Image (tube, rainbow, N blue to C red):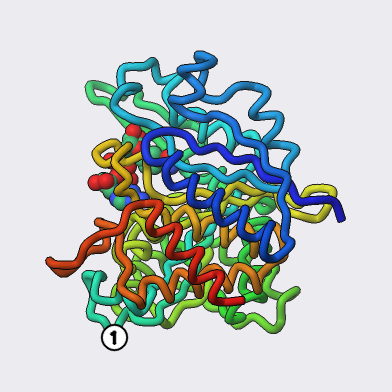
Amino acid sequence: MSTPSLLILPGDGIGPEVMAEVVKIIDWYGEKRDLKFDVTMDLVGGAAYDKHGVPLADETMAKAQEVDAVLLGAVGGPKYDVLDFSVKPERGLLRLRKEMDLFANLRPAQCFDALADFSSLKKDVVAGLDIMIVRELTSGIYFGEPRGIITEGNERVGINTQRYTESEIRRVAIAAFELAMKRGKKLCSMEKANVMESGILWREVVEEVAKDYPEVAVSHMYADNGAMQLVRAPKQFDVIVTDNLFGDILSDCAAMLTGSLGMLPSASLGAPMENGRPKAMYEPVHGSAPDIAGQGKANPIACILSFAMALRYSFDQGDEATRLETAIEKVLADGVRTGDLLADEGVTPVSTSGMGDAIIAALDASL
Ligand code: NAD
């Protein structure tokens, strides 16, 4: 098989700082595990606007369509707040998601033991938590027509439409079942079939897809109950699949079970390409953090965990992904902390590169 290709788009603010640590780790895999990647670096967001006058150049978009996976840092910053909506940094990100048709957004919520005290929930509720929310990303109420604000009689009416086709539900359900097969073989589908027709169809299609995955234990839950269960007893879940709107809310809720924004990775997957790999973009959940940009304070773990997801979901290197996650777990257990993870006074934080170096030392120790 040819060398797997990666397009790296560091972006703005802390994006380039955290991505520099990922590049160190990619180099480590090349040198120490003979796992080489054909890496191209390019611009996105404000950085692309500064050079090209648009937040994503057409050539960059074309490259993103060709590679095996895209790795993105973060976009945005106060400097670009005054720009017209059409060229704002975020439009670059949205263009990538839309044109690559990345319909399944994977948001893991994993609680590292060493950080269990960080959660706003009790330690025993979150310690060892490892769940995955699969959110439908390209349809539903954020895209459905009709939409807008109209006038009816003497008042204004705001309209959005929840709309899902069978095929849209089926493809995200298949992505979730495939994931469940690689994990704990347990899937919970969340909708509001009690009050929404789109929810009834969602449930029916998930049941149809379930017939192809007899090993997966499937359950259905109303999304409002799902929100309650996520904070009451999150460890009852393994994979959750849900629509765009509910997924937006539920994945943020689940993410915060684990503590800092600097720890949260994500993946957005599309249809399989000719080589069988899904179209894919991996990125940390956090933004460009202008308040700490350029100071070496950013936590690179969310971005590094996003690369671990790429190893697992794009490159079939589940064992190496586990090696990387275990190295991170060890570094945290040893008490190494960036500023965002500091709970106790008297602990000196490491810099962004200090955290990257500690993870590489733990990777070395794993050999
Ligand atoms: P943010 O995620 O950038 O920052 C929120 C807070 O979390 C800040 O205090 C920041 O310092 C901290 N933080 C975030 N990531 C961190 C990390 N890795 N290590 C340590 N601390 C971290 O969100 P925001 O402040 O609302 O947005 C800032 C800019 O980022 C805006 O322009 C926004 O539009 C953009 N944004 C981009 C993305 C993206 O690229 N996917 C996502 C969210 C926000």
Name the residue that disc number 1 marks: 124
Estimate the x, y position of residue 213 in percent, counting from the top left: 71, 76
- In the image, 31 versus 177, the foreground residue is 31
Residue 186 seen = yes
Instruction: Work out which quarter of the rendered image holds the N terminus and state it.
Output: bottom right
Q: Is residue 221 above or below residue 82?
A: below
Estimate the x, y position of residue 10 in percent, counting from the top left: 50, 38
Looking at the image, which residue is at 47% across and 28% down?
Answer: 45
- In the image, 307 versus 93, the foreground residue is 307
Looking at the image, which residue is at 56% across and 75% down?
Answer: 187
In the rendered image, the residue lying farthest to the left is 345
Q: Is residue 205 above or below residue 244?
A: below
Estimate the x, y position of residue 335 in percent, counting from the top left: 30, 73
Q: Horizontal placement of 245 versus 54: left or right?
A: left
- Quarter assignment of residue 102: top right
Q: In this view, does 65 lie above or below 248?
A: above
- Ligand 1 closer than 8 Å to label 1 CB: no
| Secondary structure found at label 1 | helix
Residue 151 seen = no
- In the image, 213 versus 162, the foreground residue is 213
Instruction: Work out which quarter of the rendered image holds the C terminus and state it.
Output: bottom right
Dot 1 crowding, Cα within 10 Å, few <14, some 14–19, many 20+: few
Estimate the x, y position of residue 295 in percent, counting from the top left: 29, 41
Amino acid type of the residue that numbered disc 1 sits on in the rendered structure? Asp
Looking at the image, which residue is at 36% across and 54% down?
Answer: 299
In what quadrant does ligand 1 lie? Answer: top left
In the rendered image, the residue lying farthest to the right is 1
Q: How many marks?
A: 1
- Quarter assignment of residue 203: bottom right
- Quarter assignment of residue 119: bottom left
